[in-house]
Amino acid sequence: MVDRYEKQAHHEKFQGKYQAMVVCCILGVGTVISWNSMLTIEDYYYHVFPDYHPSRVLTVVYQPFALGTIMIFLDLATKGHGGIVSYIGLCAIVALFGLADATVRGGMIGDLSLMCPELIQSFMAGLAIAGALTSAIRLITKAAFEKSHDGLRKRAIIFLAIATFIELLCVILYAYVFPKLPTVKYYRSKAASEGSKTVLADLVAAGIQKQSESTDDDSKNQRLSNKELLRQNIDYAVNLFLLYVLTLSIVPGFLYENTGQHGLGTWYALVLVAMYNCWDLVGRYTPLVKWLKIENRKGLTVAVLLRFFLIPAFYFTAKYGDQGWMIMLISILGLTNGHLSVCILTRAPKGYKGPEQNALGNLLVTFLLGGVFAGVALDWLWLIGKKNVF
């Protein structure tokens, strides 16, 4: 009898795993599609708001929530003309993006942390695919509307319409498809049996488990507090913070305002952002190669710290180098960002029960987003010494 239940559980654990990986990847795309839309239509913002450093200001107040609203705002409120009032309104909408990103990304990684590492990897890959996809669409629309009247505004509206459709698709997938996949039900049931009230609520909402079903009291009593979890994993948390501090101190503000004029002209910043996004995507799949994945905690810390040598490299390349060297550096930045992000987020939850894995995932995302905010704030330091900054 026991063997039969074990076989059934083993079957449920792996049944629908690949479908879940695909769904997680799409959800990753939807999580940051609006953030990446802001990065890839910065040339439109510079056309409308040339005096307000949009690549830096908007990244300070950012992320996904109201793509439909921002599309209406661009189309109806600005009418292709800038001004401080319109700019403040745009910043307010972008601030809502930040609230939504913290909720969605934290919730998703917390949820996936109690499942298998492959689902986290797929979700993280989806985050990078969003960047690569938006860059590809942006380059295509730029080429298509290069000589069109009011082309910047037209291609920005088309771009945001596509992104809005992807967001709506993700809402449907997460609400109606993801909870019903056998592998997802298996891991959520397992976490609920270990004392996770949040996951139990998900199961009840999906009609998979009744509210009256209790969890093991010993599992509840043995749960680690958030403080203890953070103490045990402070190196992972700090590494994520430092990883995104460096990345966001360069992308996108430095790329749009500090790289000078080159042969690619108005295409230059777009190409740099596209190269970053493409190599970030590659980096999120490289941990699938076993000998490339960094499992050692000290090794991860060393790798994260070594990335800070990129700061003087970017500075001197922007000042003295040509566009080929800059493209190489931004590719390295993207590759290492994607690779180390996946290594940390798939390694950290190992060895914990479902409730601790869920909580640890949320804690790690808090540090990740803290790094993002610190990075976009430090990005302003690149303007020191520049003339006519304000």
Image: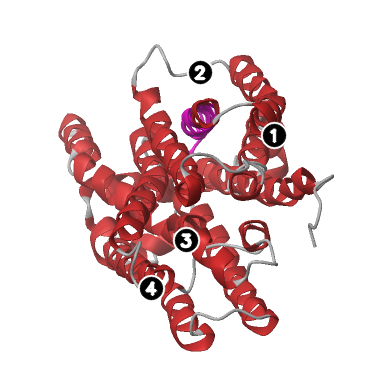
Quote the CA–CA distance across marks 3 and 2.
37 Å
Q: Which residue is mark 1?
A: 238
- Name which of mark 3 and mark 2 comes first in the sequence: 3
Q: Which residue is mark 4?
A: 157
* Mark 1 burial class by Cα count in 10 Å: few <14, some 14-19, many 20+: some
- Name which of mark 4 and mark 1 comes first in the sequence: 4
How far across and down, in percent of the image, does residue 41 sit?
Answer: 47, 61
- Name which of mark 4 and mark 2 comes first in the sequence: 4
How far across and down, in percent of the image, does residue 301 sit?
Answer: 65, 21
Tell me: 258 left or right of 384.
left
Quote the CA–CA distance across marks 4 and 2.
43 Å
Residue 41's tag is 3
Above or below 356: residue 292? above
Residue 195 seen by the camera: no
Q: Report the front residue among 231 and 102.
A: 102
Tell me the element at label 4: helix
Tell me: 88 left or right of 269.
right
Are the two marked residues, 2 and 1, in contact with CB atoms closer than 8 angstroms? no
Q: Amino acid at mark 2?
A: Glu
Q: Amino acid at mark 3?
A: Ile
> Which image quarter: residue 221?
top right
Q: Give the residues in magenta.
A: 329-353
For the point 52% across and 42% down, which residue is it?
A: 219
How far across and down, in percent of the image, does residue 331 sit?
Answer: 48, 30
How far across and down, in percent of the image, does residue 26 sit?
Answer: 30, 52
Instruction: From the image, state whether disc 1 or disc 3 is nearer to you.
Output: 3
- Name which of mark 3 and mark 4 comes first in the sequence: 3
